[in-house]
């Protein structure tokens, strides 16, 4: 039985949102996925095996063996065909298949001939990628082999789910500190290609007093509502992390500090407008510090600059924004 209630094959926008929830694109190799790909090669006796994630324009390999590649255009990917179906797709001989006979992966290097792939289907019914195995010689695949790879595909999805779980803060749903810092690492690497990035550090003002006066259950409610408000007033491509206690980080991707200040003000204003009956009229506010990523910085430099700006905002009276010096 499938682990999802409905398979959404015609909802590309929803599929892309499901893919991005995993935050796995363009991440470093991970042993568990590499080992799963190696296992597929051994089981099927094939030259190539891969776990691919497919976004708007490309097939990106989270793990691959037997082929020196990190991605291919989506337009030529065998896996894009698999992505559009509900189960395994087998190609015994690509030279006899009208879908692939003129594909450059068949006519040129690596000269693919056979393929077996299954979609990676999320629990809510979106195909975000595939696990597949390929070879340069033709071969048939049995129904039993298709079922076996489908089982391995379910294991790969479980690994993605577990990976995501450890990267999320259980209380607020924001990224964990570890997960958020991994996103900062990616931002450091791609700054030259995608433009500026700005880090916002946020702290809930006088949060200890909330816990002291109303109890930790109410404090937890405040944390959840503030996190929800920040996420709702940031952009879809931005990332929110809980860095500890009442402190959050917000990564504004592709925004210089001036433009990021406008997003930060939108967030500050929305939090200030929150109405929480549990606080009996007391307002919730946040202080914010911003730092635009500079060439040569490491993660600690970036966090430190934004954190210093946050403390400037606090010393200036709280419920305000301060840019890094």
Image: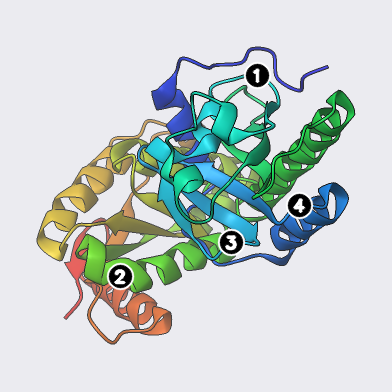
Q: Which residue is mark 1?
A: 86
Which mark is drawn over residue 310?
2
Which tag is nearer the camera, tag 1 or tag 2?
1
Q: Say if 181 sits above or below 83 in the image.
A: below
On the image, the x and y values in percent for residue 82 come to: 58, 28
Tag 4: Cα neighbours inside 10 Å, few (<14), some, or many (≥20)? Answer: some
- Is any atom of residue 124 visible in this view? yes
Tell me the element at label 2.
Answer: helix
Say which residue appears at 77% left-offset and 60% top-offset.
38
Q: Secondary structure at mark 1?
A: loop
The first of marks 3 and 1 along the sequence is 3
Q: Please give the label number shown on residue 67.
A: 3
* Image location (x, y in percent) of residue 182: 50, 66
Front-most of residues 115 and 320: 115
Q: CA distance from mark 4 to mark 1?
A: 23 Å
Between disc 2 and disc 4, the foreground one is: 4
> Viewer-nearest of labels 4 and 1?
4
User: Badge 2: few (under 14), some or many (20 or more) residues near its Cα, within 10 Å?
Assistant: many
């Amino acid at each position: 039985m499938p682990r999802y209630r409905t398979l959404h094959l015609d909802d590309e926008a929803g599929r892309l949102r499901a893919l991005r929830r995993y935050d796995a694109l363009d991440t470093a190799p991970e042993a568990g996925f590499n080992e799963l790909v190696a296992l597929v090669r051994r089981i099927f006796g094939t030259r190539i095996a891969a776990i691919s994630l497919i976004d708007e324009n490309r097939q990106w390999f989270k793990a691959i063996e037997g082929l020196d590649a990190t991605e291919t255009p989506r337009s030529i990917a065998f896996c894009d065909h698999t992505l559009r179906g509900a189960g395994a797709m087998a190609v015994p001989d690509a030279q006899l298949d009208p879908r692939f006979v003129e594909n450059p992966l068949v006519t040129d290097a690596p000269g693919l001939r056979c393929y077996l792939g299954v979609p990676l289907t999320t629990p809510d019914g979106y195909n975000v990628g595939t696990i597949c195995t390929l070879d340069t010689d033709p071969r048939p695949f049995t129904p039993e082999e298709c079922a076996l790879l489908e089982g391995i595909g379910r294991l790969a999805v479980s690994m993605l789910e577990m990976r995501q779980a450890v990267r999320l803060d259980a209380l607020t749903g924001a990224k964990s500190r570890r997960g958020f810092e991994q996103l900062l690492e990616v931002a450091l690497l791609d700054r030259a290609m995608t433009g500026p990035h700005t880090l916002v550090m946020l702290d809930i003002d006088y949060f200890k007093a909330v816990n002291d006066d109303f109890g930790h259950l109410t404090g937890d409610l405040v944390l959840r509502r503030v996190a929800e408000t920040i996420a709702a007033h940031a952009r879809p491509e931005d990332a929110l992390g809980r860095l500890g206690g009442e402190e959050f980080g917000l990564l504004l991707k592709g925004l210089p500090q001036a433009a990021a200040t406008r997003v930060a003000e939108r967030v500050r204003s929305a939090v200030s407008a929150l109405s929480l009956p549990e606080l009996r009229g007391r307002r919730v506010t946040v202080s914010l510090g911003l730092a635009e990523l500079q060439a040569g910085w490491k993660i600690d430099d970036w966090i430190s600059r934004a954190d210093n700006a946050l403390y400037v905002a606090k010393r200036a009276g709280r419920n305000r924004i301060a840019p890094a010096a």
